[in-house]
Image (cartoon, helix red, strand yellow):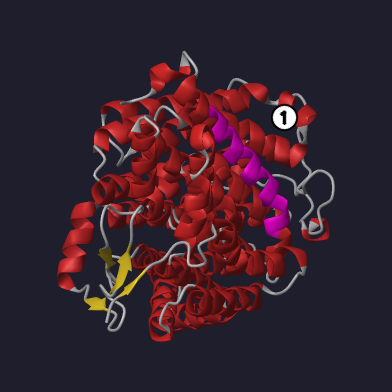
Amino acid sequence: MTWQQIYDPFGNMFVSTALAAIPVVVMLGALGLFHIKAHIAAGMGLLAALLVAVFAYGMPAGMAGRAAMLGGFVGLLPIGWIVLNIIFLHQLTEQNGSFKVLQDSLSGITEDRRIQLLLIAFCFGAFFEGAAGFGTPVAVTAAILIGLGFSPLAASGLSLIANTAPVAFGALGTPVITLAKVHGYDLMEVTAMIGRQLPFFSLLVPFWLIWAFAGRKAMMEIWPAILVTGLSFAIPQFLVSNFIGPELVDIIAAIVSMLCLIAFLRVWQPKKVWTSPSLRGHDPSAAEAKPPQPVVRHDRAALVAAWTPWVILSVFVFVWGLPPVKAWLNGIFAPSIPIEGLHNLVLKSPPVVPEPHPEGAVYSFNLLSATGTGILLAAVISALVMKYKPVDIVRTFFKTTWLVRYSLLTIVLMLALGTVTRFSGTDTTLGLAFANTGMLYPFFGTLMGWMGVALTGSDTASNVLFGGMQKVAAEQLHLSPNLMGAANSSGGVMGKMIDAQSIVVASTATRWFNHEGDILRYVFFHSIALACLVGVFVTMQAYVWPFTLLVVH
């Protein structure tokens, strides 16, 4: 028996939208306002989503339960699997002392924590976003920053803010490739359009990052380094996206930016070295920050040994992200499991699609090709290189599993919540509310992408969810479909810092457990402010010369 989604079940869009927002309000309110633990807040949000889906939207209870189950599976693999294994690698390097050597080597490049942020959170994080995405960059950079002595809130929040501009081309271009494939956009045209929006923010975000950390005056003290970092990322981002394609945008831009910043530091250093490890102003985690340590010099052999696990990780993550490798591994073992009682039984309705369309519900158990498996192999090989005994490797793995147990549970519940809202149609109701804004649609359509990522935790999922609606609305308003398809992805990147799974990844990587609400409160302003700036830019592209010249029709 099929069930067709109804996006205005009460015949009153205001009432329907208010009901659709209840699960999000419950979860974010519990997390951010009432300081309830993340896994409990996620469970409350999931319960609210199930109740709204069944009793307000008329979704059969069995279907709603199966949608939650599907989301939970996705939470474990691939998202939770990445988190578990990156923390496993970090544990291994910390236990044998090599992580301390890595910290000292980074401090040797610069003791200034502002520039360390540029190098690690922005450049290094962008590389991992381009190679793997799905939580990997935040997990890696937050772990490194906490090891360098940053306060837990600074390490968590700033890693999230930095992981924005690269997201649209993350995981070898997966979000934009999916947008084009699912909704019929021309891949090169929509890639080029995103590449004419995000470079402005790739230049802005490094300045914003340092301002958020140290304030305006401290930001201006190192403006040359910030400018080099942003420009050397933005220019390759524009060139690769407009003339090559989406797959290698972030990787090339990140490597160029990192090399340019390191080269620039050979001829320029700030007059005043910033050593504070905490956020300016109120930082509830300041007492947990490590005081700055004198720089320790290590010989070449020690440095090579310390960096080897992270080089191995980079190689494995990059290789695991290559489409031919993924296809080969999936050919060995990657069963696709249709969820009985849900698969092709939920029908999407107009205006989201031209005619009722069945929604697939297939769980891909692609364990071999999952990025987390590449990270696990990198961790095991690194452990052997570090001369760990096999029994100690296994012991550390299970110790890590116990350490992140609540984080994994939270991710499972968060993904279950997002999947229920997708199959019940409540997230589409929220999207349609944005779509009814007429001339202001370029601004609010951009915020639709922001909301999609905030709800689903994925720019890819947001593009799947709202990419078709953006195209239909743009055509009705005589706007470029490429403009609004790109706006969905570009606006979405700013929602990445407040999506629940990213916040849980950050709190886990920094071991600042049960403080997800503090992280959310800190990054929320930055997220909505940057999303609004993207919305203003897209609106100018739609109506204001010379910005209209940037539009790909």
Residue 304 picture location, percent across and down: 46, 50
Choose between 549 and 132: the one closer to the eye. 549
Residue 199 picture location, percent across and down: 47, 29
Which residue extends farthest front?
A: 11
In the rendered image, which quarter is residue 251 located in? Answer: top left
Magenta part of the protein: which range? 519-537
Residue 48 picture location, percent across and down: 59, 76
Q: Is residue 114 visible?
A: yes
Dot 1, crowdedness within 10 Å: few (<14), some or many (≥20)? many
Decide if residue 262 is on the left or right side of residue 184: right
Residue under the point 58% across and 40% down: 531
What is the tally of numbered marks visible in this picture?
1
In the rendered image, which quarter is residue 388 located in? Answer: bottom left
Decide if residue 440 is on the left or right side of residue 207: left
Q: Which residue is under mark 1?
A: 219
Q: Inspect the magenta stretch and tell me whether residue 535 lies in it.
A: yes
